[in-house]
Image (cartoon, rainbow, N blue to C red):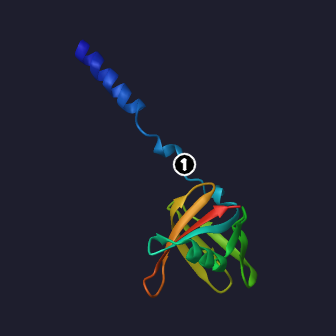
Amino acid sequence: MKKILFLFLALSLAFASCDKEDENVFDADNIIGSWSSSRVEVNGVYEVTASALLQALLPEYTFNEDGTGTETNIFGAIDITWTLTTAKILTISTDSDSNTYTLEEFTDSKFVYKSVDEEDTELTITYTKK
């Protein structure tokens, strides 16, 4: 009987002590709002001056609840449409272009994606909610 009681107790503790990673349930509505770049790493290296210069060139985004929004850069603002899947794939489209990003991190206040250009330069770009 003691063995059964011990087994039951051990199983109860095992389930109770598991990490609750699933509590951070994906919620695409967290993207709703305005976002600006806050950090850029080049080939895995963060350098303050380079990051600041690249951030100035990156657009700011406003994502509306209805799948529309605005992309604002140094040239002005343009209308966009967007989708975000449960696989954390963000697609941003304009009348003339469409870009797809796989988000490495996504919370209600931050998202991060990597981009590789034609010269194999890897950019890790972090956006934070305004």
Residue 97 spot, x, y in % from top left:
62, 84
Q: Residue at x 68, y 65 (%)?
A: 35
- Is 3 or 44 nearer to us in this picture? 44
**Does 60 sit above or below residue 28?**
below
Q: Residue at x 67, y 76 (%)?
A: 59
Residue 117 spot, x, y in % from top left:
48, 83
- Is 104 or 86 nearer to us in this picture? 104
Instruction: Please identify the quadrant where the N terminus is shown.
Output: top left
Label 1: how many residues lie within 10 Å, few (<14), some (14-19) or many (20+)? few
Residue 52 spot, x, y in % from top left:
62, 74
Q: Residue at x 63, y 69 (%)?
A: 37
Q: Amino acid at mark 1?
A: Val
Task: Count the numbered circles shown.
Answer: 1
Q: Is residue 110 left or right of residue 7?
A: right
Q: Is residue 80 left or right of residue 39?
A: right
Q: Using the rendered view, name the quadrant where residue 44 is placed.
A: bottom left
Instruction: Please identify the quadrant where the C terminus is shown.
Output: bottom right
User: Which residue reaches farthest top?
Assistant: 1
SS at circle 1:
loop
Q: Is residue 116 left or right of residue 62?
A: left
Residue 65 spot, x, y in % from top left:
72, 61
**Does 13 sit above or below residue 58?**
above
User: Which residue is denoted by mark 1 in the rendering?
Assistant: 25
Q: Using the rendered view, name the quadrant where residue 126 is placed.
A: bottom right
